């Protein structure tokens, strides 16, 4: 049976609405996965333990909110430390080869902001080339990204209707991710 590792890159998952909802929906759908919470490791990743988790997995999921058009620095730092030369790439670095790589993320901006000439200047896909290249360098299979736009909810500032919509959209996201993982695990 395929093993799934979900790496959560949210720096404060307890305070999250969108990413937490996605992970809860994924669990409720019965997905069988190991969750690695990077907010519990902070900026001092347990490199050997995390490399063992990656090595053991057939499917690797990166779950994160978009921060500054990329993934959170916590997750970037983790990749820098854990996807090391001789492990993930370079001479003898074949530990991730053949694994399936699924990115799953949320944005604050609405979908309409991600277009040429729009507030974010580029379509969403333009911001994702680095993940595609990480997969290529490490010999992983890059799967079609799953993402939900318009997830910014600020408690006490945003109307409750925004919270309800984000929860609804992120539950649907979690269900879609569960379905995708089921297909990838076949
Ligand atoms: C430091 C920071 C940077 C952000 N940068 C972006 C960005 O570049 N593009 C965007 O669409 N949203 C951006 N956002 C909004 C987050 O993506 C959004 O709040 C998040 O996806 C909601 O997920 P959560 O409820 O799990 O925290 C940013 C938020 C923070 C806190």
Image (cartoon, rainbow, N blue to C red):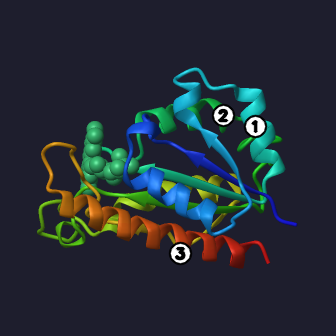
Mark closest to the chain's N terminus, 3 or 1: 1
For the residues marked 3 and 1, what is the alpha-carbon distance in whole angstroms?
Answer: 27 Å
Tell me the residue that label 2 is attached to.
82
Q: Position of residue 83 (x, y in %)?
A: 66, 39
Q: Are marks 1 and 2 in contact (CB under 8 Å)?
A: yes
Q: Residues within 10 Å of mark 2 (few under 14, many from 20)?
A: some
Q: Is residue 53 left or right of residue 83?
A: right
Q: Position of residue 11 (x, y in %)?
A: 44, 35
Which of the image's four quarters has the N terminus? bottom right
Q: Are marks 2 and 3 in contact (CB under 8 Å)?
A: no
Mark closest to the chain's N terminus, 2 or 3: 2
Instruction: Tell me: residue 118, above or below residue 46.
Output: below
Which of the image's four quarters has the C terminus? bottom right
Tell me the residue that label 1 is attached to.
51
The residue located at (45%, 73%) in the rendering is 172
Tell me the residue that label 3 is attached to.
176
The residue located at (32%, 66%) in the rendering is 124
Q: Which type of secondary structure does the marked residue at label 3 adopt?
A: helix
Disc number at residue 115?
Answer: none
The residue located at (35%, 59%) in the rendering is 127
- Frontmost residue, 96 versus 3: 3
For the residues marked 1 and 2, what is the alpha-carbon distance in whole angstroms?
Answer: 6 Å
The answer to whether any part of residue 2 appears in the image is: yes
């Amino acid at each position: 049976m395929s093993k799934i590792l979900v790496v959560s890159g949210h720096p404060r998952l307890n305070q999250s609405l969108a990413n937490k909802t996605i992970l809860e929906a994924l669990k409720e759908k019965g997905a069988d996965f190991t969750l690695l919470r990077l907010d519990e490791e902070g900026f001092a990743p347990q490199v050997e333990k995390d490399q063992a988790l990656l090595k053991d997995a057939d499917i690797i999921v990166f779950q994160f909110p978009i921060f500054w058009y990329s993934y959170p620095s916590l997750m970037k730092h983790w990749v820098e430390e854990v996807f090391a030369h001789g492990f993930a790439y370079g001479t003898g670095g074949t530990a991730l080869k053949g694994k399936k790589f699924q990115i799953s993320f949320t944005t604050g901006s609405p979908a309409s902001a991600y277009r040429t000439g729009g507030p974010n200047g580029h379509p969403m896909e333009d911001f994702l080339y680095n993940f595609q290249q990480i997969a290529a360098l490490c010999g992983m299979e890059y799967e079609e990204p799953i993402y939900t736009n318009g997830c910014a909810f600020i408690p006490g500032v945003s109307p409750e209707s925004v919270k309800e919509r984000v929860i609804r959209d992120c539950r649907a996201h979690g269900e879609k991710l569960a379905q995708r993982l089921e297909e990838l695990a076949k």
